[in-house]
Every structure is written in structure tokens, then in C-alpha cells.
């Protein structure tokens, strides 16, 4: 599993991602969840905070888990080389997960989760001393079916 | 012509100045709520979510109050302020960090009716409940500070470690429980450095299950050290109860109306020539060692104490008669 910082996403990748539904229309892809199978929205909750340093700066990492991660099939997180890449990663997963604040501003994202259990190790970070958004949510985007699963709002204060 | 252009440019600049948005005003009273949001103005009807979010919207000398039960997060305080959650459950979970850092020149801070929890998990151990680095006065009223288990010199419920000036800390009606790890850490630790002076008043406070209940250490001080008064309090269930260490800077402690009990080591332990403890109307019991003084320190009695049923009672250095 690897994080995908907003700043590191190239313009090409962004464009490709936005065009993904169009590309997908004519592409043969791995099996989707069974037809008619309705997957639930993720139930997001905070696990804790970690304090760490990187590049000479101090950060706070806000860690989250998805309570109902077992409800999602493994193929949702299978490598999807036929779909647009995530930056240089041409083997990113079929479903990407993004963090947003309550007003819909994207905070961080994951494009290489390998299995549903990885939803138990989601996080985003802010520089120490910066007040984080009070409420955040995640959105899972199944790029194969262009289906979006939006979570509840979860808090950042422990 | 050129002058007219200059005048026009000047007017544009002036107009821009007039239309610029004024800095957001700070309120003397702000509110936090478990369902608030830090994008709000922190008013009663639009409360904030955290103390850190509310503090920038609170005027110096103002007060942050809690509307309902909630975890309002750790915060660094750099201006005079009161945080008061009386009437509800206001808390700060501070795993991996310090709950409240007090660090502002000449500020007066009051923290009232809060629960501050370090989490206790070894992987994300809370650092200190409160760390007082700089300020004039800190009032701690009815706080519960527990489970700050980072390794020494951290792992304290309250760490008072100024490097300059005279600071006054008043602690009343509070509980400092289960802080520290192994033999390091304390319920309350006082460690002034340089010429800083600490005047600490503790009343009606329970310090239990900390490696050291109260630790006064002036060995790093070159000034007037520390003066500590402890009244009506319980210090027990740790490795040592009251530990006083002094070098050239004095550490004067008065303990009255209090009980020091059930410590696995010493009830009261003083070392260094500048360490002086006077005890009145107090009970020292059921410790492995009641009293210990070394290296010129003194543990003295006003003559109305109960030194009883310790593994070894030890002895007072001297006694002053009841007057």
C-alpha cells in the first residue's frame, strides 16, 4: 500500500483519471462485483494520531479504519494495469481512496491499496501546529464501474 | 499629467486599503462542541471542534467553554486564557503528544474541569499532561491527568520546567494518576533551569500510581530554586511519594494535612544540601521506607505528624514544637 500525495500527482495522471470512465467504456477489465451486488458505503472512524518527522518538519498523522471493510470484495482492490496509471505506477489498484474535508477539498489519497483489509490503515497528515479540518470523509472510486462510495464524516479530534 | 497619474495611483492604493477585509475579531468567550467545526467562529450557536481551533478566535484574557461532552484535543497556549469545561465532560486525548503546553511570556492560564489522557499505549505514549515552559501563573483546577507514560524526563502529569522568571502554579482538586513508566515520570515534576524560580501550591489533590508522586528537582537551577506547599493531599501507590533533590538552588517543601502511603520505596526522600522539607499534621504510613534524607538534606517535623507502620520509619532531621 502506498500513499499518493496530491502534490505528486502529475497533470497527465489527473487528466487520465478524469477520463477514466470514457476509456473504460471500451475496455475489457477484471470481473466486477457480481451484477446487482450493492456494496455499502464505507463506515469511517478514527483510530488515533501519530507524531513524526520527515524532511526536517514535524507532522501529525491521522489514522483511520473502515469498520465494514470486510464487506468489500478483493477484486475491488486488484491491480488494474488496463486502467489509467497513478503517476508512474501503471499497476495501481482498481479502486482508489481519497480523503476530503467537509467542504469537499481533497486532502490525500491512496491508489495502490492491495486488498480490502488495507482500508484499516488509511491516513492523512498535516504539519504539526496546523489545525486540521474538524471533519473528513473518504470516497472510494471503483474506476472500473465508475462507482463512488462515500463514507460518513469522521472527526480528527481524538 | 505625471502628477495626476501619481495621484490616481495613490487613490487606488488608498481605496484598496479601505476595502481590504478587516482581520477577524477575537471574542472574549468562545465555545467548543463535540459536533462543532473549527471553520466556525466558535460562538455559542456555531461552536468550534477543538481547543486548538478555538484559541485563535479567542481574545487574550478570554475564555473557552465546552458546550457538551467531547474530546477537544491537545493545544499549545501562548496567551492568557481560561479553558473551562465545568458542567460537562471536556477532555483531551493526547496519545503521542503533550496535552497542554503553556509557553508565553507573562501569561496567566487557567485550566478547569478537564480530563487529559495520555492513552498509556507504549507505541503512542502520551508525553506530558501539561508542560509549563513559560508564563506568570498557571491555575489547574479539578483536572484529571492520567496515563502519560513516555520515558523520562517525560511521562509526567504536570511538568513545570521554566528557564526564566518566577512562575506560580496553583493546583487544586485534581487527580494525577498512572503517569510515568517504570521508575521514571511523576504526577507532578518541578525542574526549573537557569535562574527560573517556581512557586507551587498544591491543595486537595490525589497523586496515585505514579512512579514518583511529586518530584522537585532544582539541581539544574542557578536561581532561587523552588518553593512548594502541599496541603490536604494524598501521595501514594508509586515507587516514591515525595522526592526532593537540590543542588545549590534551594528546594523548600511544606507538607501539611496530607497522607503519604503505600509507596514501594520511600514515602519522602530528600537529597542535597538545599533540600528542606517541613511536615505538619500529616501521616506517613505503609511505605517501604517512611523518611529518608541524604547529602545534607533535611526532613523536618512540626511535631504533630504520624510516622507509623512503614517497613522502616526513618527519622526526622529535626523537630519544631507546635506553636
Image (cartoon, rainbow, N blue to C red):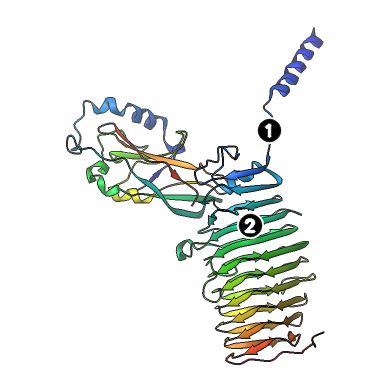
Front one among B279 and B97 = B279
Q: Which residue is denoted by mark 1 in the rendering? A: B23
Outermost residue toward the top in this view: B1
Left/right of residue B206 with respect to residue A76 in the rendered view: right
Q: Is residue A13 above or below residue B208?
A: above
Crowding near the residue tagged with mark 1, few <14, some 14–19, many ≥20 C-alpha atoms within 10 Å: few
Q: Is residue B14 visible?
A: yes
Give the image location of residue A45, x and y in percent: 40, 48
What residue lies at 60% left-to-right and 86% top-to-bottom? B285
Q: Is residue B66 shown above or below B236?
A: above
Q: Chain of mark 2?
A: B
Q: Nearer the viewer, residue A20 or B53?
A: B53
Q: Residue at x 60, y 58 (%)?
A: B113
The mark lying in front, picked from 1 and 2, is 2
Residue B71 in the image, given as x and y percentages of width and height: 51, 52
| Sequence order check, earlier mark of 1 and 2 | 1
B26 left or right, relative to B319: left
Q: Secondary structure at mark 2?
A: strand
Question: For mark 2, what is the residue?
Answer: B112
Measuring from the top left, give residue A82's x and y in whole percent: 25, 34
Amino acid at each position: 500500500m502506498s500513499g499518493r500525495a496530491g502534490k505528486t500527482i502529475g497533470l497527465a495522471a489527473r487528466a487520465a483519471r478524469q477520463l477514466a470512465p470514457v476509456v473504460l467504456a471500451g475496455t475489457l477489465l477484471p470481473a466486477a462485483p457480481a451484477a446487482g451486488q450493492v456494496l455499502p458505503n464505507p463506515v469511517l472512524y478514527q483510530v488515533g494520531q501519530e507524531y513524526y518527522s520527515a524532511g526536517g518538519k514535524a507532522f501529525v498523522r491521522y489514522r483511520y479504519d473502515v469498520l465494514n471493510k470486510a464487506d468489500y470484495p478483493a477484486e475491488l482492490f486488484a491491480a488494474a494495469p488496463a486502467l489509467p496509471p497513478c503517476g508512474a505506477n501503471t499497476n495501481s489498484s482498481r479502486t482508489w481512496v481519497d480523503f476530503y474535508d467537509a467542504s469537499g477539498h481533497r486532502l490525500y489519497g491512496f491508489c495502490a491499496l492491495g486488498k480490502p483489509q488495507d482500508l484499516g490503515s488509511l491516513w492523512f497528515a498535516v504539519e504539526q501546529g496546523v489545525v486540521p479540518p474538524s471533519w473528513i470523509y473518504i470516497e472510494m472510486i471503483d474506476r472500473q464501474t465508475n462507482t463512488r462510495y462515500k463514507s460518513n464524516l469522521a472527526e480528527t479530534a481524538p | 499629467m505625471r502628477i495626476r497619474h501619481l495621484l490616481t495611483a495613490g487613490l487606488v492604493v488608498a481605496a484598496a486599503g479601505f476595502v481590504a477585509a478587516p482581520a477577524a475579531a477575537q471574542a472574549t468567550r468562545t465555545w467548543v462542541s463535540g459536533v462543532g467545526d473549527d471553520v466556525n467562529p466558535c460562538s455559542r450557536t456555531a461552536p468550534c471542534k477543538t481547543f486548538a481551533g478555538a484559541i485563535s478566535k479567542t481574545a487574550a484574557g478570554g475564555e473557552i467553554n465546552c458546550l457538551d461532552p467531547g474530546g477537544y484535543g491537545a493545544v499549545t497556549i501562548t496567551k492568557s486564557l481560561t479553558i473551562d469545561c465545568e458542567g460537562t465532560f471536556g477532555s483531551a486525548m493526547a496519545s503521542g503528544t503533550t496535552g497542554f503546553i503553556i509557553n508565553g511570556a507573562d501569561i496567566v492560564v487557567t485550566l478547569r474541569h478537564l480530563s487529559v489522557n495520555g492513552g498509556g499505549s507504549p507505541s503512542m505514549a502520551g508525553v506530558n499532561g501539561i508542560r509549563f515552559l513559560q508564563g506568570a501563573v498557571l491555575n489547574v483546577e479539578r483536572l484529571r491527568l492520567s496515563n502519560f507514560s513516555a520515558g523520562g524526563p517525560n511521562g509526567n502529569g504536570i511538568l513545570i520546567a521554566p528557564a526564566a522568571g518566577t512562575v506560580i502554579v496553583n493546583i487544586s482538586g485534581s487527580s494525577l494518576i498512572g503517569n510515568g513508566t517504570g521508575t521514571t515520570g511523576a504526577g507532578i515534576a518541578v525542574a526549573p533551569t537557569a535562574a527560573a524560580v517556581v512557586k507551587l501550591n498544591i491543595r486537595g489533590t490525589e497523586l496515585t500510581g505514579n512512579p514518583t508522586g511529586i518530584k522537585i528537582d532544582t539541581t539544574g537551577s542557578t536561581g532561587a530554586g523552588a518553593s512548594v506547599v502541599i496541603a490536604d493531599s494524598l501521595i501514594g501507590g508509586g515507587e516514591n511519594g515525595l522526592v526532593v533533590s537540590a543542588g545549590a538552588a534551594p528546594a523548600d517543601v511544606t507538607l501539611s494535612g496530607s497522607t503519604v502511603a503505600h509507596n514501594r520505596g520511600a514515602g519522602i526522600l530528600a537529597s542535597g544540601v538545599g533540600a528542606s522539607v517541613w511536615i505538619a499534621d500529616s501521616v506517613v504510613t505503609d511505605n517501604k521506607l517512611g523518611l529518608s534524607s541524604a547529602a545534607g538534606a533535611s526532613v523536618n517535623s512540626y511535631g504533630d505528624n504520624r510516622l507509623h507502620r512503614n517497613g522502616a520509619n526513618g527519622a526526622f532531621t529535626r523537630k519544631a514544637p507546635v506553636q
